[in-house]
Image: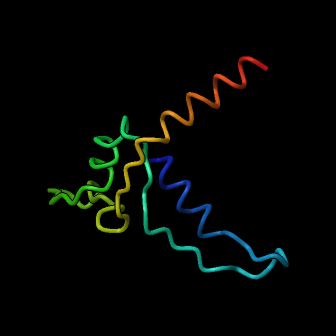
Amino acid sequence: MTSLGVALKSMGLQKGLDGVTAIDVTPKFLIVPASLETVALQTIAAITPAQVSNVNPFSGKLKLIVDPGSTRRRANQQLSQETC
């Protein structure tokens, strides 16, 4: 979840073309390859924690989109980089 938190923070700090004006970038989707579907579901799951420190900050914020082609594209990219 740390990586997702870093990504969300980075999106929130985006600036406009002038490099000064903050833009309102709020992600709505979490797009993952099929191989990470279960991990993604766990990451955005709604839970009822016994302690405040165990609250899932991503619960209800992102809609999951599973892209079965992304794993294939990544493998093809790695293969093309290795053969160059």
Residue 30: x, y in percent?
43, 57
Left or right of 75, for residue 2: left
Quadrant assignment for the C terminus: top right
Residue 71: x, y in percent?
48, 35
Indicate the colouring scheme: rainbow
Q: Is residue 60 above or below residue 7?
A: below
Q: Nearer the viewer, residue 5 or 51?
A: 5
Residue 62: x, y in percent?
37, 64
The residue depicted at 25 percent of the width and 61 percent of the height is 52
Left or right of 25, for residue 51: left
Q: Nearer the viewer, residue 53 or 40?
A: 40
> Total label count?
0
Q: Is residue 5 above or below residue 18?
A: above
The residue depicted at 57 percent of the width and 34 percent of the height is 74
Q: Is residue 78 above or below residue 20?
A: above
Q: Indicate the quadrant where residue 61 lies.
A: bottom left
Q: Is residue 84 above or below residue 57?
A: above
Residue 9: x, y in percent?
57, 62
The residue depicted at 29 percent of the width and 63 percent of the height is 59
Q: Furthest residue to the top?
A: 83
Q: Nearer the viewer, residue 75 or 31?
A: 75
Q: Indicate the quadrant where residue 18 lies.
A: bottom right
